[in-house]
Image (cartoon, rainbow, N blue to C red):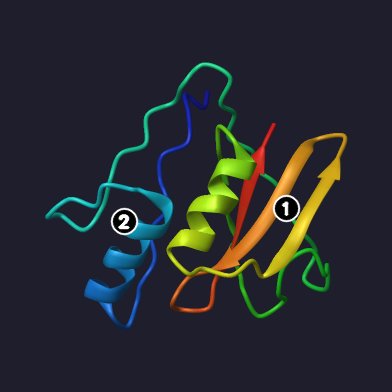
Amino acid sequence: MIKGFGGVFWRTKNLDAIKKWYSEVLKLEIGDWNGTMIKSQSGNETIFSFFSEDDPYFPTDQQVMLNFQVHNLDETIKHLELVGVPLARKKERSEYGQFIWIEDPDGRLIELWEK
């Protein structure tokens, strides 16, 4: 029944600042319509998962967490250092891959994942 992931939509208090941050930090080309289309690539997967209200994996006051799959996490970390974005948590490894976390200007925790 489900063909694919449709999108993520949210409100922000400072549209220009948030667009600039996502463009510079995550290299997302944000269009005049205030969004971008990320097309699936071979080897890319979209995870849809639920967490209990008290699960500490991401802040309990944050209802949704974005996860972006990246090609090379070490290169991503170098880029983040160059643009002055600190890691919110250090790199972790698991059977699912490697992960880091950063925060956007609105304070949302974002997970970056290399499979």
36 horizontally vs 48: left or right: left
- Give 84 or 39, whichever is nearer the viewer: 84
Residue to which mark 1 is pinned: 50
- The tag on residue 23 is 2
Q: Amino acid at mark 2?
A: Ser
Q: Which residue lies at the image location 82% right of the left edge and 70% below the top edge?
A: 56
Q: Which residue lies at the image location 26% right of the left edge and 52% below the top edge?
A: 35
Vertical relation: 29 (above or below) 107: above
Q: Amino acid at mark 1?
A: Phe
Q: Residues within 10 Å of mark 2 (few under 14, many from 20)?
A: some
* Residue that sits furthest to the right in the current view: 95
- Give 50 or 106, whichever is nearer the viewer: 106
* Residue that sits furthest to the top in the current view: 42
Q: Position of residue 97 (x, y in %)?
A: 77, 36
Q: Position of residue 92 (x, y in %)?
A: 81, 51
27 horizontally vs 67: left or right: left
